[in-house]
Image (cartoon, grey):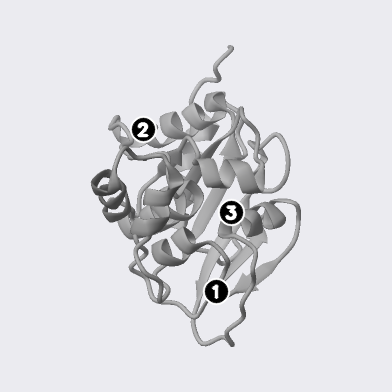
Amino acid sequence: MAQSNILELMDTGYPVAIRFVQDTASSQTDMLFCELVQSARKGDKVIFSEQGCPVGAYVLSRDAPRPDDYYHRSGRYKDRASAVEAAISLPRLVKQFSSIQLFPLIKSYDRYDILLLFLSPNKAMQIIQALSYHTGLPSEFRTGGTASICGDCTAAAENNHQLCISLGCKGSRKHSKYGDNEVIVGIPKKLVIPIQKGLDTIPGVFY
């Protein structure tokens, strides 16, 4: 069988639980969303309503402008039109909330909305296979190499209620420094048990 416990797939750190909370006092931090996620990965519990990344602020549906100018200045697009198209393509969280809680997930029955994992490609493949075990259908996700943690694996996973995988983005790899050999996996809570059951059943890579 594949490695069976979804909470033990990461080589370093804890899986990160994301919970969208209503009716809490607002709190601001200058840290970026991806940096806060890494703090939770190391064992910290974090709660905030505003964070320091302009792209993350837009993606997480705070009162922030679309990052057209930010992308245009980045040098990653050939012209302004391409930069604007990239910004338009960003997922944006639909769910309303007052604050976001990030915490290391140790017990799978804790209350949360999204589970974030930082995995080797091999283990990310096992997650996909474990979900496909139930229906035979492939997982579908998209990424532009931008807003990987906040957009690809948080907003898109929550909005679409589906497994999302991202290869990362320049910003999150630069600022939060997860491994070059890691990809990010975002899992809505409703899929955690089916994936766990699949992991308990499918053969391992080397068997």
The residue under label 2 is 132
Secondary structure of the residue carrying numbered label 3: helix
x and y percentages locating residue 140 in the rendered image: 30, 37
- Looking at the rendered image, the quarter that the N terminus falls into is top right
x and y percentages locating residue 133 in the rendered image: 38, 31
Q: Is residue 193 visible?
A: no
Q: Nearer the viewer, residue 59 or 12?
A: 59
Q: Quadrant of residue 134?
A: top left
Q: Earlier in the sequence, mark 1 or mark 3?
A: 3
The residue under label 3 is 34
x and y percentages locating residue 147 in the rendered image: 45, 50
Q: Is residue 99 above or below residue 78?
A: below
The residue under label 1 is 50
Which residue is at a point 35% across and 40% down the rendered structure image? 77
Q: Nearer the viewer, residue 46 or 105?
A: 46
- Which residue type does callout 3 highlight? Cys
Secondary structure of the residue carrying numbered label 2: helix
**Outermost residue, right side:** 43
Q: Nearer the viewer, residue 47 or 204?
A: 47
Q: Nearer the viewer, mark 2 or mark 3?
A: 3
